[in-house]
Image (cartoon, rainbow, N blue to C red):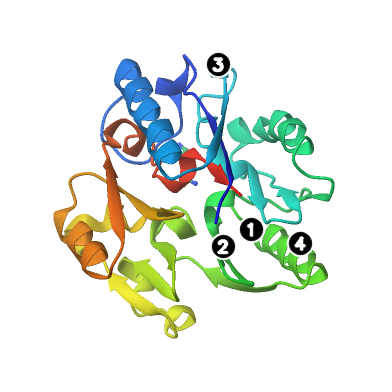
Amino acid sequence: MFKNTIVRIPGESYINGLTTSNLGVPDYEKALKQHGAYIEALKTCGVEVTVLPGHADFPDSTFVEDTAVLTPGFAIISNPGAASRNREVIEMGQVLKSHYENMYYIKSPGTLDGGDILQIDRHFYIGLSARTNLEGAEQLKALLELENYDATIVQLDKFFHLKTGISYLGNQTVVVAGEFIDHPDFQSYKKIIVPPEEEYAANCIRVNDYVIIPSGYPKTKQIINEAGYETIELDMSEFRKLDGGLSCLSLRF
Ligand code: CIR
């Protein structure tokens, strides 16, 4: 069960955020509305939502997931791999200090984005991507092992972040797309396979009794519903334009 979440409203500079998607410039007003709906969905799932104000210095700072890795007992402040995002962690570290006594930090030359980290019970998967390097991954693995968790480092092929292509729903069930469908590291799990034309829906989040999914992906929704999960659909169009998905918009703990 999650009790807490942290989100950050998209700042005025949001439209200048990083992207590889070629989907056009986000509509800021629409992004604010979609973010408001995201907050409401989290509340429906029964969690406290700490809403941080927009931060114009950091266009991508609404994607708070990348700034930390959280467990019930400790927080690890990441070291984001994109230069324009790196200092987002300073303020998030301050915010997390009010929730955690036990805090660790990923340090340069290690880089790590929270979007590359997937927790499945006591095990973590750490994606090596354009943002997370081997040094950052090994630092995280060592910290997790110190706290009696295990970790596997997974080399990404095409996905932007690890969680762009895989989500964990609980009950040993993962939602997988693309390169993760037949990936040896995920063979032991029950798999919900996202068809290629719905790949964006592989980034979904289980929050207590619900799975929040992006709207517009009917096949994935149906498979998740048939597996016994209740879904909440959210329009994510303005976040997708900057390579963002549902998990990116919150820290959940
Ligand atoms: C970036 O390039 O960093 C942002 N435009 C998107 C970050 C998405 N975050 C995530 O997948 N965890």
Marks 3,4: beta carbons within 8 A:
no
Q: Relative to 159, is 121 above or below?
A: below
Q: Disc 2 marks which amino acid?
A: Leu
Marks 2,4: beta carbons within 8 A:
no
- Per the model, the C-alpha gap separating discs 3 and 2 is 29 Å
Q: Residues within 10 Å of mark 1 (few under 14, many from 20)?
A: some
Mark 1 or 2 closer to N-term?
A: 2
Residue at coordinates 61% horizontally, 45% vertically from top-left? 81
- Can you identify the residue that label 4 sits on? 139
Mark 3 or 4 closer to N-term?
A: 3
Q: Residues within 10 Å of mark 2 (few under 14, many from 20)?
A: many
* Residue 138 image position (x, y, % from top left): 72, 66
Quarter of the image for residue 36 reads: top left
Of discs 1 and 4, which sits in the foreground?
Answer: 4
Out of 157 and 63, give the one closest to the viewer. 63
Give left or right: position of 104 versus 232: right
Q: Secondary structure at mark 3?
A: loop
Which numbered circle lies on residue 128? Answer: 2
Mark 3 or 2 closer to N-term?
A: 3
Q: Disc 4 marks which amino acid?
A: Gln
Residue 150 seen in the current view:
yes
Residue 130 seen in the current view:
no
Which numbered circle lies on residue 56? Answer: 3
- Per the model, the C-alpha gap separating discs 1 and 2 is 6 Å
Residue at coordinates 49% horizontally, 18% vertically from top-left? 11
Marks 3,2: beta carbons within 8 A:
no
Out of 80 and 3, give the one closest to the viewer. 3
